[in-house]
Image (tube, rainbow, N blue to C red):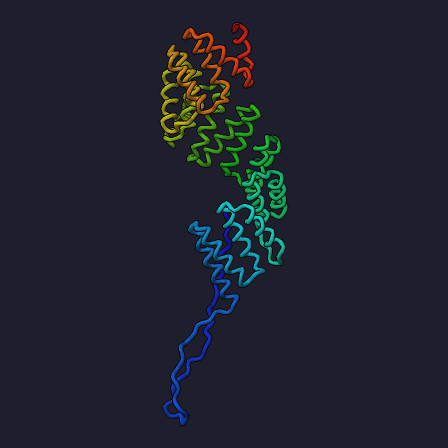
Amino acid sequence: MKKILSCCAFLACLYGVLQAQNNDSPTPQSESKDSIINLIPSQEAEKAYNEGIEKMKIGDYKAAIDFFTQSLAIKPDWGKSYFNRGVAKKENKQYGAAIQDFEKCLSLTDSLQDVMYNMAQTFELLKENEKAISYYTKSIERNENKSQAYYHRGSVYLNLKKYKEAIDDFSQAIVLKPDFAYAYNDRGSTKRQMEDYNGAISDYLKALQFNPDMTFTYNNLGSAQRKSGDLKGAIESYSKAIASKPDSYIALNNRGSARFDLGDYKGAIDDFSNAIKIKGDYTYAYNNRSAAKFKIKDYNGSVDDATKAIQLNSDYAVAYLNRGIAKEMLRDPKGACTDWEKAKNLGIELAGKYTEDCK
């Protein structure tokens, strides 16, 4: 979340004296000089700083960095200029340089609120998870954006598969902000990872209650419903995600999987095909369509799709397994055994049973 300090108004001072002609003066008349408006150094720094703020407002972070740098050249110990240059660098993906600016800001007497929070965000973007957690904790201790800090620290814990800690943080974020839709969504995803599908469904529904435009939450809800065995409910949720975002190839693939589980193989093939139209290198959709084609006895089509998945990912173990099964139906036992052996070597235990009949 971007944090931009508000612009400070400043008053330009008028310097220089306009020499007036005096026709009554006995001294020789002199020509008046040009009037000059000068800014004292602090005002020049403020002017560059305010220009930087304006550039940040329109997302021109490179120009903002240049203006903040100008302000610091004039006023080198200005904390809020370091802070906002750090934010601009973070948004410009100059993460290491952003951290240096935040650290400089912290070293100054006019150090600002939200520095710890922005440091944590930057470390999270760098995937330095332990440092991100440390700075989010400091942010919480300093009462900086507490609901957001709890939420983001929970996200880091989720990425680290520390599910209990993630749920605790998402719950704290919700206590501080009861309509925090994203926190409900991510707590639901954490519960889904823990196979608490009913708890996940409850959280996803709560997220959608507060923000019905969250397309990805419909997709997440569908996945929890599918895992809980509610295939019709899953298809309905995936359909809502697709209606909201027609190019959601993930939701199309997932709806295809639910239709496959329900025995609607032709409907599944349609969904997998539409996902591939959107994302031509989507390996999962090729493998899944291979499995669906096998079910309708299109064995050549099954081999072709599994082959495409393998071309896109040479270590796709399940695709080797599926292609081997399809090849067996096409009376190609040698090709089937080669694929099963490959799947076995890639860690598919089931493939070992198939290779037992291979010579």
Query: Where is residue 62 shown, x and y percent of the image?
Result: 46, 51
Q: Is residue 171 above or below residue 306?
A: below
Query: Where is residue 88 shown, x and y percent of the image?
Result: 50, 50
In-front residue for pair 328/105: 328
Q: Would you identify the image quadrant in which residue 158 lies?
A: top right
In-front residue for pair 257/309: 309
Which residue is drawn at the image coordinates 42% and 80% (left, top)?
18
Which residue is drawn at the image coordinates 54% and 9% (left, top)?
353
Name the outermost residue toward the bottom. Answer: 26
Q: Is residue 348 above or below residue 54?
A: above
Q: Is residue 301 above or below residue 149?
A: above
Which residue is drawn at the image coordinates 58% and 54% (left, top)?
112
Q: Would you identify the image quadrant in which residue 264 lies?
A: top left
Q: Would residue 133 be found to the left or right of residue 246 on screen?
A: right
Query: Where is residue 71 shown, x and y percent of the image?
Result: 51, 60
Which residue is drawn at the image coordinates 46% and 75% (left, top)?
15
Query: Where is residue 281 shown, x and y percent of the image?
Result: 41, 27
